[in-house]
Amino acid sequence: VSNVDIAPSITYVLKNYPKSEHYKLPDNVGEIELVKPQTCNSYDPSLFSFSLHKTGIVGSDCVPNTVIPDSAASCTVTTGKFEQQLKGYKQAFFLGNSDSVKDALIKFGPLIISVEGQLNEIILGWDGADWVVAQQKFHQDGGATVPDYAYELGTRTISASKTDYVGSLFYHSAATIRAAFKLITAVVIIPALALLF
């Protein structure tokens, strides 16, 4: 992942969504095909990971969030730069206790977790007895609590008794394999070197 700061183009993500879903029913009952329209109202978080893995994301300076583009192969704004970020990444979901969360942080990096039923907090790490988090900000609008789509840095106490942390993470399988190979190499070579000295 390169060190970039972009406003992602959700319309680019929608353009690269699966066009349909196919289900084969058991016992030769038949098949069901669900066609997915490409509209801003058809956003489905469960399909996001397919689009991310296939084409990544680009900045809204390349593909503005005003209309779904006709093509996802280039920028729709002539001054934009077509740079796909996070291409090849996958999304995984988890359920576990605080030790599981710490293991996932070490292996994969920041995690998006569910607080009060919504994926709205990012665990960045931990410091002693506290999680270091980016918490989603909200405001009141006519009696309803509405997300601001902005985050602020904060802390949350780690609960050792909590066993139901729910969330998701993004990972690149090739990077995970390389990291595991480096760990295995270190575990094998370091003891062998110790025998020589």
Image: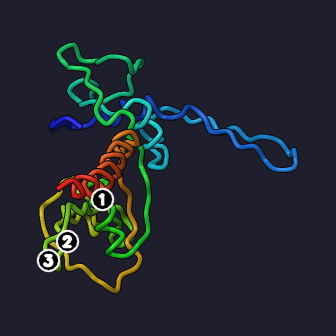
Work out which residue is located at the far front of the displayed protein and give it. 196
Q: Quadrant of residue 130?
A: bottom left
- Quadrant assignment for the C terminus: bottom left
Colour option used: rainbow
What residue lies at 73% left-to-right and 41% top-to-bottom? 32
Measured Cα–Cα span from mark 1 to mark 3: 18 Å
What residue lies at 40% left-to-right and 68% top-to-bottom? 166
Measured Cα–Cα span from mark 2 to mark 3: 8 Å
Q: Which residue is mark 3?
A: 128
Inspect the image, locate mark 2, and give the three-letter code of the amino acid beneath it: Trp
In percent of width and height, residue 6 lies at 19, 36
In percent of width and height, residue 8 lies at 26, 37
Instruction: Judge from the rendering whether residue 3 lies leftward or rightward of residue 60; answer left or right.
Output: left
Measured Cα–Cα span from mark 1 to mark 2: 11 Å
Tell which circle, 1 or 3, labels the residue nearer the N-terminal end.
1
User: Eyeballing the image, is 126 above or below 93?
Assistant: below
Q: Tell whether label 3 touches label 2 (CB within 8 Å).
A: no
Q: In this orientation, does residue 147 appear?
A: yes
For mark 2, does the 10 Å Cα neighbourhood hold few (<14), some (14 to 19), or many (20 or more) residues?
many
In what element is the residue under mark 2? strand
Work out which residue is located at the far top of the displayed protein and give it. 78
Inspect the image, locate mark 3, and give the three-letter code of the amino acid beneath it: Gly
Inspect the image, locate mark 1, and give the three-letter code of the amino acid beneath it: Leu
Q: Which residue is mark 1?
A: 111
Q: Which mark is residue 131?
A: 2
- Quadrant assignment for the N terminus: top left
